[in-house]
Amino acid sequence: MSEFESRRLSELTGPLQNAESGPDGSVQSRRVFLARTSVLTLAIPGVGAALAACTPTGSKPADTTHRGAADTGRGRTPGTHNSDSRLDSTVLEAEHRPGTSATGAATAAGPNVAYHRYAPELPPLPTGATGATGTTGTTQRIHFHAREAPVRISDDTVVAAWTFEGDVPGPIVHTRVGDTVEFTLTNDGDIPHSMDFHAAQIDPKEAFRSVVKGQSLTFTFKPRFAGAFMYHCGTAPVLMHIGSGMFGAICVSPREPLAPARDYVLVQNELYLADTANGTRASDYQKMLKMMPDIVCFNGRPNQYVKDPIRVKVGDRVRFWVVSAGPSHPCNFHVVGEQFDTVYLGAPPASAIRGVQTFTVAPGGGMIFELMCDIPGEFPFVNHGFGHGQKGAIGLLVVEP
Amino acid sequence: MSEFESRRLSELTGPLQNAESGPDGSVQSRRVFLARTSVLTLAIPGVGAALAACTPTGSKPADTTHRGAADTGRGRTPGTHNSDSRLDSTVLEAEHRPGTSATGAATAAGPNVAYHRYAPELPPLPTGATGATGTTGTTQRIHFHAREAPVRISDDTVVAAWTFEGDVPGPIVHTRVGDTVEFTLTNDGDIPHSMDFHAAQIDPKEAFRSVVKGQSLTFTFKPRFAGAFMYHCGTAPVLMHIGSGMFGAICVSPREPLAPARDYVLVQNELYLADTANGTRASDYQKMLKMMPDIVCFNGRPNQYVKDPIRVKVGDRVRFWVVSAGPSHPCNFHVVGEQFDTVYLGAPPASAIRGVQTFTVAPGGGMIFELMCDIPGEFPFVNHGFGHGQKGAIGLLVVEP
Amino acid sequence: MSEFESRRLSELTGPLQNAESGPDGSVQSRRVFLARTSVLTLAIPGVGAALAACTPTGSKPADTTHRGAADTGRGRTPGTHNSDSRLDSTVLEAEHRPGTSATGAATAAGPNVAYHRYAPELPPLPTGATGATGTTGTTQRIHFHAREAPVRISDDTVVAAWTFEGDVPGPIVHTRVGDTVEFTLTNDGDIPHSMDFHAAQIDPKEAFRSVVKGQSLTFTFKPRFAGAFMYHCGTAPVLMHIGSGMFGAICVSPREPLAPARDYVLVQNELYLADTANGTRASDYQKMLKMMPDIVCFNGRPNQYVKDPIRVKVGDRVRFWVVSAGPSHPCNFHVVGEQFDTVYLGAPPASAIRGVQTFTVAPGGGMIFELMCDIPGEFPFVNHGFGHGQKGAIGLLVVEP
């Protein structure tokens, strides 16, 4: 990174902090905000080359993990363009929602969007496998589209979200140590986006760089460690991209399978909402800076598993793959009326502690929590830091006889 | 839980959050607050059947662990009543303290309440045992009364608290893996309360359900894991019930005794105080939502072990059973001038790490910290997150020659 | 500690909290603030005897670890004086900056202070050794001067800091389990300061007591555990002394050397800045109480290792000794595009977990994070709690082919 670029970085973080300290909490104009975004894309390491030299790939991989959102063909051919003018046109379209996620298609038809429960089940490992099988495992091809879209998170709230595959969180990815993931990101959104897998050991300057509208990027990695890992958009300001919905879980199983269990994925995230416009609430960057979320929840929707619980049977082992997406706060994970036989602080089967009531998953981290369902009942799982936790980070594990 | 109930839950969390976001921090009327409380009692899983179907028990168990507060006979016979009208009468009595803990007897004679130090010593295991001894251990019968009562936490401050047994924290419970705890809760307070032991694996919908005034509930459990566990009232809003004083520690020893030590129990909690009325400060729900406590302390009183330290001798092993009651913040536990030989992140004797300066106990969690007192001196123990820690989470361990 | 002293402590914490709760955020006069500081110095355990009975030492040890700041001979002979009047004169000099770090020499010539990068490399163990070598190791003599000094943390910001050796953080200390550290603190500042090493097991009432201007204090300790430990000024209010710059890292290697690695020390800290006066920003105690920092960074300067990265080669093992100085917030340490092979939660080589994306270092704590640099690239290291992390807690690890 050149000194010129880092100077632009400091120019950027400066004003944002000043805005936070300001007496009126005023937000900058959308034009300034988006200009910042594009400059930061250049200035933040790992995404430096994005706008200037986005490298589309010619391959057309199969989508293997789309969930929840309808997948209409969006295989448009990436082309060259003047990204600045494109950003400017976005500015013109959404001039009335400065400093928020109310971009492009994020609010279109918002009030008509249907609610759906986010399925928490860990999907099975791809057995058919789209690639060759060898001694080091199979190859899984995944194609995500970054898309600005309205997402209904409750009966009365639709959020103008920035998404992977139209949902928040994005689809759950399940792979295995030593297998190969070939990932393609296509950006259908108006502003640059990118993908950072915490399960990958890879040069982020190349693999995690930003992609502008209409372009694609492919990279390949082999997870070395098992665990519950976060993925997220790493385009600056990362706080805004995660806070607006661009995150999810990639679960890596060890090569020696863990004990049979009912596996569930819970991604805790915070929502910071601007006032409603057109029936859709946008993510509010100024609120994110103040770190006092309106909602904290599992898998994007407050209390969704109270309304429609996770159901297992007596005798089941339940394994929660818990990811704390933040963008700012941890998850103090606890199950009322139960105790965790095992919590894996690092890669299973090592790094385990036993007999745990509550453990903190760092923002940007993940851990695996196991319990045996010896008795029937209704067991709420919560973030036991109640100031945030009661804002929606509660669900129900129903153990049926 | 029916959909109707969960919808009421979301109605409740909505307005509370809006109140927090409001420009003036105004609180709702007490009538609204208490109405909310009673609805939430129905709506929160695990306590759902409380008001409608509280099941009193006829047994009259012996109280084995009362500490600190005088135990005047409160074995009143539970009866049937219209809980709504009862709640309403509470509203009428305390109309002037909306959104606070200033209920019923919580402020009565507050200014005249005497200060007492909360004894931090882990009580011995009950050897005489009130129940039968068998291969799986003894039975300990415990009877707590939920009571709204003023508690003096310092020379100049009395808090209108919601308590177990009239003190904050409630009594320390000491039991052992495989032993049986038969617990009875009798509610002498004006609003519903309940009990959630983190050491129990039990159906919370039944065991942890709310109990209304004058009624009782009994349940039995056998702790499976050793450790320092939290207990607390789980009646909604849990934030309010924990924040107003309804929490404590249940310490579970392993069947193979740990190394001989001086054992102390430290429960960190936060206080959020409303302005004084009648010389007694109440817990303030709006402040709890903002998560900026006025006081953070060990065992309910700021700096109490600075005033009257914990005293041991050179050569002693000291074992701190640290519980972080929150309701919202962790405890970053540290002893100035010492280092922990061992911290048990989970159930001892496993899950141990060595040579630790500071470790974070999650809100709703507990850990065991051990150190050898090799040298004499005065060693402050603190929450090393000083923004909160300096609000009273400091004590003195004096090691005498 | 006498009851008289502890009462003064409670008098002090009370008003500070009230000030925080106040509607206007007004600060007390500097005279009151400094008076408080000196009283607290008496009242806080471990530093109680400071002002009254500071014990200078006659020895003139060699300074072995000065880094970054020019070391002009400051071996002035400690003398007796009336510390109260001295404090008063400080008040007179800086009457215009109440409640801040703008004391004594902290602002002098601030605008002209040059920026320098804080060298993150772990210094080698002292082999020549200033003391005798025996079976239990060598003796290292260290002499720090507490000094109020302006420190440039970026192109446009100079902070009126309270420092060890004129820099923030203070110098990195590297020692070894069983070796001896003989430490001397000389106070060149206007207000009392002290030294608390988390690597020492020692009576803090004596060793960590406050030293007034012009006086010195020497103590000796042998670290028993390996790890990344914090050191800091423990003079009350500790929040203010850490928040104004008086902290650093003492790294203790085990006697059996760890695997060869490139070792780097990263100390995360928060800055809370008052408005500029005379071109220098001071640390703001009222902001510290509100716990919303303006800057969060590694080794005292926002984004300094983005501007000038840490550079290693493919094949290197990198070992980060991460200390979270706070004063209030944790560090959720993460390296973008990499995973930690090992994180030592306690003393290495034990207490290790494997395959970690992100782990939380408590404020006042330290952990060791190791990764293997198998591939070239540019890997940002961050605090993944982005609300705070994006305020400057980012750096670049460049792995060259």
Image: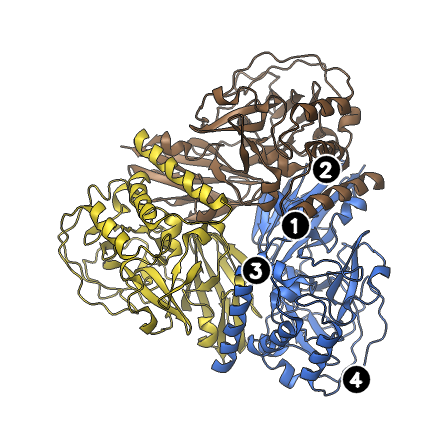
Chain colours: A yellow, B blue, C brown
**Circle on res. A387:** 3
Q: Label 4 near label 1: C-beta < 8 Å?
A: no
Q: Alpha carbon of mark 1 to alpha carbon of mark 4: how far? A: 45 Å
Residue type beneath disc 1: Ser
Query: Which residue carries the number 4 mark?
Result: B77
Res C98 → quadrant: top right
Q: Quick check: B191 above or below B262?
A: below
Picture coordinates of residue A40, whole percent (x, y): 32, 42
Q: Residue C208 appears at what percent x and percent y?
A: 69, 31
The reply to whether the C-beta atoms of the residues labelled 1 and 3 are less than 8 Å apart is no
Residue B6 location, x and y as percent?
50, 77
Instruction: Check chain identity for marks 2 and 3: say if they share one.
Output: no
Residue B374 bears which disc, if any?
2
Q: Could you tell me the amino acid type at mark 2?
A: Asp
- From the image, tell me which residue sits under label 1: C21
Viewer-nearest of labels 2 and 3? 3
